[in-house]
Image (cartoon, helix red, strand yellow):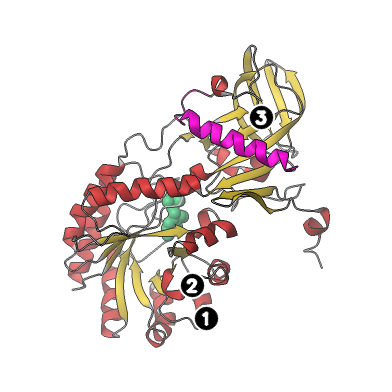
Amino acid sequence: MTPIAKTLPLNFSHPPEMIEFWQRLAREALSLSAPTPFYVFSALPIAEKISELDAALVAAGFKSEIKNLKSPVGFKHFLSFKTQPVASLLRWWQGQGRSIEVVSEFELRAALAEGFAPENILVNGPAKLWLAQFDLRELSVNFDSPAELAALLPLAKKLNWRCGVRILTGEEFDPENPPFPTQFGFTPDGAVAALKKLLRAKTRVETVHFHLRTNVSAVAIYERAIAEVAEICRAAKFRPLHLDVGGGIPVQNVLSRGGKVYDGEFGLRSFAKMLRQSAKLFPGLREVWLENGRFVSAGSGVLVVKILDVKARRGLRQLICDGGRTMNALTSLWEQHALMPLVERGGVQVLTAIHGPTCMAFDQLARIPLPRSLSAGDHLLWLDAGAYHLPWETRFSHGHAAVFWQDENGLRQIRARQSFENWWSPWT
Ligand SMILES: Cc1ncc(COP(=O)(O)O)c(C=O)c1O
């Protein structure tokens, strides 16, 4: 098999070694009789993204997570569970002694099952009344509303939770309807009241938190949000130990369907410098917490589909594949990813739509120029499938895809393709 670098789509900036890396893993999975469609995920790109972020933070003057340098302010990465709920990823991350952020009962149970100690688990998200059934000491919990706080405060005291407050800053809005706020966190006044209440109750209140949205386009947006949070802390006479800036660092190598480069105006180094500067607004701060999902894991996976049928009409070639948007890649509704044949195919490129097998025109991964010589039996790779693909996969007319995982121990199948029996079994 020959590499396909020549058919690399324009507008994406993956280094050729990265493309070759995924081709090699896809071929290796196929050689293990992988049934398409399947995902291949790898720990390596995640380790690289964390190193990239660490290098920027340490260069900006933060204390390294590993080396104990002089700077008084450190940082900590939390794995965003919801972004990529893969057991092998959790085990790999936990094996490095790192921490995890969960937002539901199931995520908390899974984190505990995979060996995370409660003190390495941060619980976020709205309406966490389900937390009352757990008897876990030293959990980190970011409260989201007055009612939630009132309900859980006795437990927070009893179990010595490390409490935090999520704040709805002026920078947070519904990205689809910017005039409207999101449903998360306390209003600024509400946050002051919540912090005072936690202090009065003599709980272990340590953290102020915001999460703006995904793909935050500019560093200045975070900077303004942090300044607002610092004001709130002053008003509440509260000195946090931790500033939790959530996730939201924009993804690399992915475009919006309209062609926007998500990270076009975002620099990691200036982000790190801004964080270091802004940390000075919080006397006594010990750590900045980061919960990046998309930035950390988007590049850690590919979706592999096989062409089953080919049609051509009204000037459009159509490839009907065994996987696609509806089942495996909902993000293709608003994102363009690099998409390419596994094996180089030459000849004229023609406008080609790549469809999944479900009975919906909606099931279309992309409409891009591809070689006319592509035919049934060929495989296609959809890159950057390592974030928000698995959480949004469906069982629409078909079963879930197989999943492969690669780490220091090599490549292996970690989830079989869903069988008919399993697909139909939830019904009583
Ligand atoms: C509280 C919180 N933290 C972190 C994240 C991860 O966000 P991203 O994938 O944009 O980095 C999310 C995503 O929804 C979130 O809600």
Q: Where does residue 325 sit, x and y in percent of width and height? A: 64, 40
Q: Dots 2 and 3: beta carbons under 8 Å?
A: no
Q: Nearer the viewer, residue 31 or 186?
A: 31
Label number found at residue 134: 1
Q: Is mark 2 within 8 Å of ligand 1?
A: no
Q: Where does residue 21 sit, x and y in percent of width and height? A: 54, 36
Assign the magenta stretch its main secondary structure. Answer: helix
Left or right, 42 with respect to 284, comes to right
* Secondary structure under the numbered disc 1 in the rendered image: loop
- What residue does disc 3 label? 354
Instruction: Name the quarter where the C terminus is drawn.
Output: bottom right
Q: Is residue 425 magenta?
A: no
CA–CA distance in space, label 2 to label 1: 11 Å
Q: Nearer the viewer, residue 127 or 418?
A: 418
Q: Earlier in the sequence, mark 2 or mark 1?
A: 2
Instruction: Name the quarter where the N terminus is drawn.
Output: top right
* Segment tinted magenta in the rendering: 9-34
Left or right, 71 with respect to 11, comes to left
Quadrant containing ligand 1: bottom left
Q: Residues within 10 Å of mark 1 (few under 14, many from 20)?
A: few
In the image, what residue type sits under mark 3?
Ile
- What residue does disc 2 label? 128
- Tell me if residue 273 can be seen: yes
In the image, what residue type sits under mark 2?
Lys
* Secondary structure under the numbered disc 2 in the rendered image: loop
Direction front: furthest residue? 409
Q: Earlier in the sequence, mark 2 or mark 3?
A: 2
